[in-house]
Image (cartoon, rainbow, N blue to C red):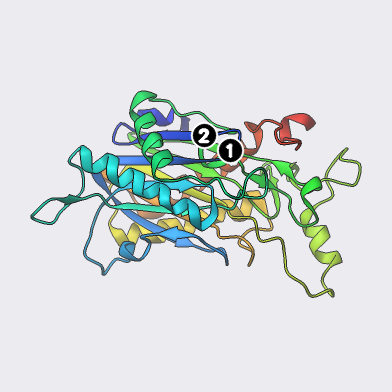
Amino acid sequence: MLKNIKISELKDFRIGNATDVKNATGCTALICEEGATAGVCVRGGSPASRETELLRPENTVQKINCVMLSGGSAFGLEAGDGAMSFLEERGVGFDVGIGRVPIVCGASLFDLELESFKVRPDKKMGYMACENAFLKPEPDEGNVGAGTGATVGKLRNAADMMKCGLGIYAASIGEVMCGAVVAVNALGDVIDCDTGKILAGLLNSDHSGFYGSVRCLYEGLEKPGDLWSGNTTIGCVITNARLDKSQCNKSASIVHNAFAKTISPAHSTADGDTIFVMASGKKDVQPDAFNALATEVMAEAVKRAALTAKPAYGLKAACDFL
């Protein structure tokens, strides 16, 4: 029933990456020029986000034009300014009478520990990601965009963590299409929810296999202390479904089930796990059925974030164990 499709088949959206391999950071823009009804759910305890408050159903603006996912922690939210400039030049945004204000939401993950604390996604990089969204219809996965500096399995030290990245997956049922883009930078491990096996995460002492993040947590249960704070998994669901703001917010909440299925542990106090939903409103749907589809699509995207990542910055990736 569920058919795998290319994410570029969602014609109302454009997706582009800007990547700084040298400094292990980047950003990913998801653009809907016509405007998409949107919602968000922040489950992690340490988020860095932009314009999430306007997505509350009672607030005035009904549609957004872009979600910017970026590295750089809170500094990386500046990449959204690049999307603002790019979209303003194209006459895109909320009409305020004297001009148009592009509505750009966003979230950032922490990737500053790999190469350079001082180099983060900025306005120029955000603009470049938007340009690339129109230059290259099919976005890349893996060590690109917001996933450039993404890592997982960070409960002990930097030497025992693994490289992860940006995952993309899309599927359709009938004429309803749903895609997910996610940068996986979790404190814990990425799990294959079909087999229960760890795909990427905390390595054992000789790096020949996995130690297990939950096991590590249990061992420290009676040892109060702070967890590694350089985490956060951020993603966005895009769809041609017709959903209002309340339904988009509820969908974003339910889609977090995908993180719970594929990341162990998920939603920790040291993660800022955030999911956006953007709906272009072309096809009627039964909301609960759509949410089941979106959850499955996001779960596949999380797995792809691990499986498409390549070893980098002295870290192993899932492909080293396949």
- Secondary structure at numbered mark 1: loop
Q: Nearer the viewer, residue 277 or 141?
A: 141
Callout count? 2
Can residue 322 be seen here?
no
Name the spot of residue 319 as percent of width and height, x first: 73, 30
Q: Residue at x 61, y 56 (%)?
A: 260
Name the spot of residue 308 as percent of width and height, x first: 62, 31
Q: Is residue 311 left or right of residue 210?
A: left
- Secondary structure at numbered mark 2: strand
Q: Nearer the viewer, residue 31 or 118?
A: 118
Going by the numbered disc 1, the residue's amino acid type is Thr
Q: Residue at x 80, y 46 (%)?
A: 159
Are the residues flagged by discs 1 and 2 in contact, CB closer than 8 Å? yes
Q: Against 204, is 252 above or below? A: below
Q: Residue furthest front?
A: 118
Q: Give the quadrant of residue 176.
A: top left
Can residue 66 be seen here?
yes
Q: Residue at x 25, y 49 (%)?
A: 102
Q: Residues within 10 Å of mark 1 (few under 14, many from 20)?
A: many
Q: Is residue 57 left or right of residue 23?
A: left
Residue that badge 2 annotates: 19
Q: Residues within 10 Å of mark 2 (few under 14, many from 20)?
A: many
Going by the numbered disc 2, the residue's amino acid type is Thr
Name the spot of residue 28 as percent of width and height, x first: 45, 40
Q: Residue at x 34, y 51 (%)?
A: 286
Q: Nearer the viewer, residue 196 or 38?
A: 38
Residue that badge 1 annotates: 148
Name the spot of residue 7 as percent of width and height, x first: 42, 31
Circle nearer the N terminus (1, 2): 2
